[in-house]
Image (cartoon, helix red, strand yellow):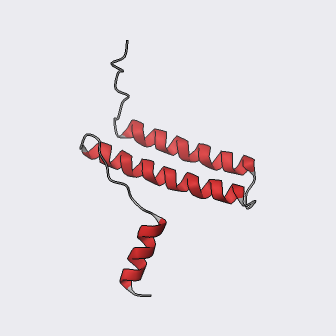
Amino acid sequence: MEESDKVNKENFLHPLSRYYGQVKPENLVFNANLQEFSQKVGYIVNLQTSGKITSEEAYRRVKALWKTLKYSKKELGIHDEPSNES
């Protein structure tokens, strides 16, 4: 397999979306983590839907991924911004 074929396959399997938020290093890292979370949740859902893993196992895996994402947000120092709504 040629290098360009590997790159095309990787881009197909793991597409990255453009980031439109405030450009700060911690936001870019969190966005990458969020996209990875999303991709992995999609894989887990597909495994559960096709009967490869149980609903309980899918829940356990998603919960573990969520904890990892939540921890990365805390470690990067990203805080919820206060709402402007009254």
Whole-percent x, y for residue 9 in the image:
45, 74
Residue furthest top as drawn? 86
The location of residue 26, given as percent across then percent down, is 30, 43
Residue at the (60%, 43%) spot, across then down: 63
**Residue closer to the observer: 50 or 77:** 50
Nearer the observer, 18 or 57: 18
Q: Depth check: 56 or 47 in front?
A: 47
- Where in the figure is residue 55, as x and y percent of width and height? 73, 48
Residue at the location (37% across, 83% down)?
3
> For this view, does 25 lie left or right of residue 57?
left
> Quarter of the image holding residue 77?
top left
**Image location of residue 35, percent across then percent down:** 44, 52
The quadrant of the rendering that contains the C terminus is top left
- Position of the N terminus, as image quadrant, is bottom left
Identified at 39% across, 58% down, the residue is: 16
Q: Check the image and report above or below for 10 versus 83.
A: below
Answer with left or right where residue 17 lies relative to residue 44.
Answer: left
